[in-house]
Image (tube, rainbow, N blue to C red):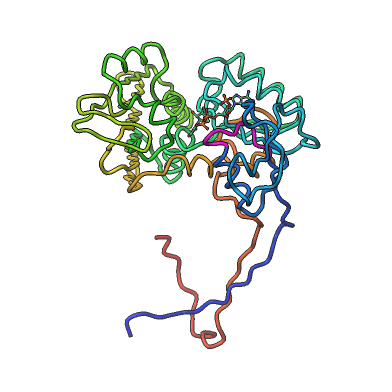
Amino acid sequence: MDAVVKQWIVQATPVSVPHPTRVVLFGLGQIGQRVARLAGSRGGFEIIGAADIDPAKVGRSLREVCQSAELPDVRVVGSVEEIRAAAGAVALHTTGSQVGRIAAELTALAQQKLNVVSSAEELLEPWARDAEVADALDQTAKEQGVTLVGAGVNPGFVMDLLPVALTCVCQVVNKVSVQRVVDAATRRPALQKKVGAGMTAQEFLAEVEAGRMGHVGLVESALFVAQAMGWRLDRLEEVLGPMMAERDLTTDVLTVGAGTVAGIKHTAEGYVGDKLVLDLDLRMYVGAEEPHDAVQIEGEPPLDVVVRGGTAGDAATAAALVNAAPRVAAAAPGLVRLRELALAQFAPAEGLRLAVRAEASDKGKTGAPRGTGG
Ligand SMILES: NC(=O)c1ccc[n+]([C@@H]2O[C@H](COP(=O)([O-])OP(=O)(O)OC[C@H]3O[C@@H](n4cnc5c(N)ncnc54)[C@H](OP(=O)(O)O)[C@@H]3O)[C@@H](O)[C@H]2O)c1
């Protein structure tokens, strides 16, 4: 005999009466539709309304817009004011990236007494770029008794929440480094275009100069980590350049010729004095080999974690929004940061308490072992 097998009988007792989290979809683009399909197919969520400004979607059934028979037959409306009895529900907001541009939408949602989880990248650190706008949103949310938060895959997980969560076992943290390599061909068409795939280097750099190119939210990820670590950054350097294609590449939506831009290399380095404490390196390009996410924490104990294949972005973004919804509904009012919510995790349909008892044949065989804490 080289092992002792023990069979446990597991007893599950519901600890909370399952009642679904009521959600409203606000924005039905690629991400909004994925969010709708996920919320519609998972237990624990009830879709009570959907809004989008696109005239081609307004008036149609959500089922039809999202091409999913699993969804309720809810009519898509043009504004949130048209959704009845929405107070207390959670709006899953997926219309844009910049806080300044979506502030009016968030205010309207809060005034309808809706909580909000938004995929807007800048909302991860809403005070980073315009504190006045963020303060106004915070005040409105508090007055209306609702909670607003930004969530997503990146920002929202890979380069911020994940490394911060890992530091919960660190006595000392000297430096945080994160690398994310994404094959843009696996992402939605909007993202493939957003990384400049198929452009010449000059076209790409002109778009960067005009602020129309690259990943939104790297600065927010850097501030999220630095604030969580209590680092007063003296300097933050962001660099955005092209990854060039070495061979001809084709995706479902575009062609990238050899010698043209395949995507982006976007980095952010944070310094305290002359010391590099934060090193974020994001590469999203068509044809990326060995996609992965990797985090290194220099400290005590040091940590070196790799997600092989990387975190699949669009599926993960939809999940991040849906999974955050019950926690946002239960959080204290205001504009909050994701790390201030109870730990974001998969949202089960019911709360359970699990207990074990050994099968009769095992009884009396075991002593009380000492913990190993391994
Ligand atoms: N944090 C993350 O990890 C993460 C990940 C993925 C995406 N994102 C962000 O999430 C957002 C959504 O992505 P996407 O690819 O789904 O974008 P998209 O395809 O452009 O979808 C946005 C949708 O919202 C609609 N819309 C725009 N303004 C609106 C308003 N005021 N009221 C109601 N609907 C409105 C748009 O309608 P029109 O088409 O008529 O404008 C469109 O249907 C983007 O900003 C993206 O950068 C974040």
Q: What x and y, as percent, mark residue 179?
A: 32, 36
Q: Is residue 271 visible?
A: yes
Q: Quadrant of the C terminus?
A: bottom left
- Depicted 134 relative to depicted 369: above or below: above
The answer to whether 114 appears left or right of 131 in the picture is: right
Tell me if residue 1 is in the magenta stretch: no
Estimate the x, y position of residue 74 in percent, counting from the top left: 71, 41
88 displayed left or right of 128: right
Q: Residue at x 46, y 73 (%)?
A: 369
Residue farthest bottom in this picture: 361
Residue drawn at point x = 34 percent, y = 22 percent = 271
- The quadrant of the rendered image in which ligand 1 is seen is top right
Q: Nearer the viewer, residue 368 or 234?
A: 234
Residue 26 forms part of the magenta stretch = yes
Residue at 47%, 79% (x, y): give it. Answer: 6
Against 7, residue 128 (above or below) is above
| Residue at 41 percent of width and 64 percent of height | 372
In which image quadrant can residue 12 be found? bottom right
Using the image as rendered, state which of residue 128 and residue 70 is in the foreground.
70
Give the side of residue 257 with respect to residue 239, left or right. Answer: left
The residue furthest right is: 85
- Where residue 297 appears, as percent x and y from the top left, is 34, 39
The vertical placement of 198 against 352, above or below, is above
| Screen quadrant of the N terminus | bottom left
Q: Nearer the viewer, residue 51 or 6?
A: 51
Q: Quadrant of residue 92?
A: top right
Q: Percent x, y for residue 195?
A: 36, 26
> Which range is magenta?
24-32
Q: Is residue 339 something one can see in this rendering?
A: no
Q: How many marks?
A: 0
